[in-house]
Image (tube, grey):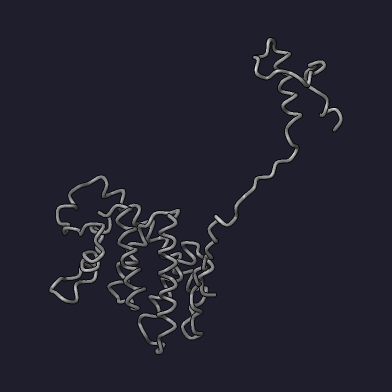
């Protein structure tokens, strides 16, 4: 079989090694002879000379750390986690129905507060949580506000809040309400940036949870909930409490 494959596809006759390549071929047969002759003069294997000194050294990628393991007295049961996932799934389905209903009506937009610009993290943090250095009232994540936000804004505000949790090392009830509300309308499949944001949320919650000392701390259930939803509902299972 191999010998058959090496047989020439076209018969070109005897080839003159002294063929003058400066003169155009006078026929198709002569053109083919030139092709064969040029092919015979090529090396079977060609190796490029590469100056490796000009290559940039590869930068190492440090993998993101996972969640901090929960202290045994803070660790939620699998049954509790499954219940939270089922409840959250039901809430998301209801929110999807409300989005459809609101799309058919414009009356609900009349009493909406003016929302901050999407690119201003400071104004959004003040809007959601209230300003600490001035008289700025925190807004609750009402249905009207949440359903008026497009997906790009939802993702951006979620990132602002998660950054606040990570940088400030705290998760207030008001933060928790806003983050939960935004998670109910985040679209799936997750954008890579959103996925990274949710993973940051779970890791930040796990670190905060590990720093608590009291089993009665009201923050424990909130942190357990967000870790559970990120890991089990949004399928980041490597972060799950087991």
| Percent of width and height locating residue 14 | 82, 17
Q: Quadrant of residue 217?
A: bottom left
Residue 241, image x, y percentages: 51, 74
| Quadrant in which the N terminus appears | top right
Residue 199 falls in image quadrant: bottom left
- Vertical arrangement, residue 192 with respect to residue 73, above or below: above
Comparing 15 with 138, the one in front is: 15
- In the displayed structure, does residue 44 sit left or right of residue 72? right
- Left or right: residue 211 versus residue 160 is right
Q: Is residue 159 above or below residue 26?
A: below
Where residue 242 appears, as percent x and y from the top left, is 55, 75
Give the mark count.
0
Residue visible at 40% across and 78% down?
A: 221
Q: Which residue is at a point 16% across and 71% down the rendered structure image?
A: 137
Give the camera-side residue of 61 and 39. 39
Which residue is the extreme one toward the left? 135
Report which quarter residue 45 is drawn in: top right
Above/below status of 52 relative to 209: above
């Amino acid at each position: 079989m191999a010998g058959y494959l090496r047989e020439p596809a076209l018969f070109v006759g005897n080839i003159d090694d002294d063929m003058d390549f400066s003169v155009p071929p006078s026929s198709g047969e002569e053109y083919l002879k030139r092709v064969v002759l040029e092919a015979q003069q090529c090396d079977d294997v060609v190796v490029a000379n590469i100056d490796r000194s000009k290559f940039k050294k590869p930068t190492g990628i440090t993998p993101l750390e996972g969640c901090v393991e929960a202290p045994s007295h803070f660790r939620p049961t699998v049954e509790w986690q499954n219940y939270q996932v089922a409840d959250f799934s039901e809430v998301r389905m209801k929110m999807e129905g409300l989005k459809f209903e609101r799309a058919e009506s414009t009356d609900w937009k009349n009493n909406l507060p003016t929302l901050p610009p999407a690119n201003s993290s400071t104004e959004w943090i003040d809007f959601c949580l209230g300003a600490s250095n001035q008289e700025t009232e925190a807004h609750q994540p009402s249905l009207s506000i949440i359903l008026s936000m497009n997906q790009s804004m939802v993702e951006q505000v979620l990132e602002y809040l998660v950054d606040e949790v990570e940088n400030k090392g705290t998760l207030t009830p008001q933060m928790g309400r806003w983050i939960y509300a935004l998670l109910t309308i985040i679209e799936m499949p997750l954008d890579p940036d959103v996925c990274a944001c949710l993973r940051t949320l779970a890791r930040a919650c796990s670190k905060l949870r590990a720093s608590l000392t009291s089993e009665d701390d009201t923050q424990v259930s909130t942190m357990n909930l967000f870790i559970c939803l990120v890991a089990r509902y949004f399928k980041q299972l490597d972060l799950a409490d087991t």
